[in-house]
Amino acid sequence: MSDAITILGCDGFIGSHLLEYFLANGNKTIYGFDQDTRRISHIVKSDKRFQFFQGDIYLSPDLDRCINDSEVVISLAALCNPSLYNTLPVDVIESNFNNPVKIVKMCTKYKKWLIHFSTSEVYGKTEASLHCDSYDLHCSDVIMKEDQSQLILGPVSAQRWSYAAAKQLLERYIFAHAIQYGLHYTIIRPFNFIGPTMDFIPGVDGDGVPRVLACFMDSLLNKKDLCLVDEGKNKRVFTYINDAVNAVKLIIDNKQNSVGHIFNIGNPQNECTIKELALLIIGIYQHLYPDCDKSLLNVKHVTAESFYGAGYEDSDRRYPDISKIQKATGWVPAVDLKTALTETMKAYMKKYASR
Ligand code: UDP
């Protein structure tokens, strides 16, 4: 058996950053699977340690062999963009449950360590939002703890929660395989990772509504108002991709402490409302481009239904307890929100400004 790493979804935002990290550090063979090469085309043929298999991951004749030849399988491939939850709900459920089920079975069969990327959205709405002010940090129900928090989703008609429900069922399916068949697993719940190459600009290299940061970049690039859904009152914790990659590295380095656990990966220091995010982004933009036309940098209020369509419901807040991963691996997020946004925005401007 080799000590190779298989990355499923290696052309995605997180997968491509992990791939670059593993190729720049260490000497392990990396098997990568993805249908696309948008982010990794510069690597595909240039690094002998990287073997890339392009196409439908789950139909690949090489998947079985590569998983069997690996020490760790990192599973990332999924549709995970909120605008798809109520426009392509069947595809969202299939890509987040039906397809990765095959990977759980293969890892169980070959006794491989599965590091599965779930989502912070499995927590759903905060318990606090049901009975007290979810923005009061002293309300203990606000803090999301891997092994204690309730997972609270809305009704079936609110399709927003189909993604979280599929992810949650897969977590339970993985856990069940550990109990029944001894699968070695680690589940990661990411809290809004941001960084260069995340998402797309609509009409340039993708269609539909990307996540909030890319929406705001689209607005800046195309001189449109930044849209605040439901007054931008919901809160998120934004985590820089380099911190996230470091967390995965530490998990792999601390296998003993990491197998059989679910970990939040998020930077609680970087919490803000979406309105605060918009204003911060406008401020950074003005700093980066002092000659820009400031009269064009505005926010506007929109309803969730007009922005996303029917069936959208929001997570009011996602605030992680990260003591578990800190204790298991020593991980501490280091990149503050302003730096994370500045680096991400610079990368966006470099890539898209001249198009
Ligand atoms: N949002 C917004 N304006 C936008 C895009 C998103 O106000 O142009 C809000 C959205 O309603 C949610 C938050 O920003 O409250 C984060 O949305 P995102 O799509 O980034 O992902 P989520 O954290 O909900 O999974």
Image (cartoon, helix red, strand yellow):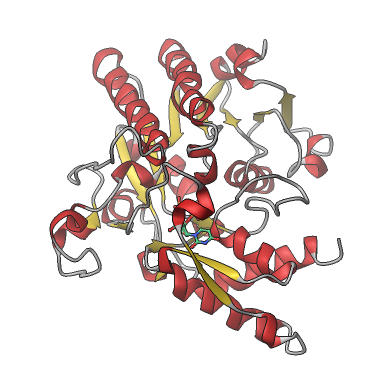
Q: Is residue 257 left or right of residue 219?
A: left
In screen coordinates, is 220 left or right of 355? left
Measured as percent of width and height from the top left, residue 131 is found at 13, 57
Q: Looking at the picture, does residue 327 appear above or below residue 164?
A: below
Work out whether 308 lies above or below 27.
below
Q: Residue 28: x, y in percent?
A: 63, 34
Residue drawn at the location 43% of the way across and 14% of the way down: 105
The image shows residue 99, relative to residue 302, as above or below, that is: above
Q: Position of residue 114 (x, y in %)?
A: 44, 28
Q: Give me the residue at 37% from left, 52% from top.
A: 314
Considering depth in this image, is 330 or 333 the residue closer to the camera? Answer: 333
Residue 255: tell me if it is visible.
no
Q: Residue furthest right?
A: 354
Front residue of this view, candidates 189 and 316: 316
Residue extending furthest toward the bottom: 291
Can you tell which quarter of the image residue 323 is in? bottom left
State which quarter of the image contains the N terminus. Answer: top right
Please state which of residues 56 and 62 is positioned toward the viewer in this rendering. 56
Total numbered labels placed on residues in the image: 0
Where residue 203 sits in the image (x, y, percent)? 76, 50
Res. 7 image quadrant: top right
Q: Residue at x 54, y 33 (%)?
A: 78
Q: Is residue 317 above or below residue 255?
A: below
Q: Nearer the viewer, residue 202 or 58?
A: 202
Look at the image and tell me whether residue 134 can be seen: yes
Quarter holding the C terminus? bottom right
354 on left or right of 303? right
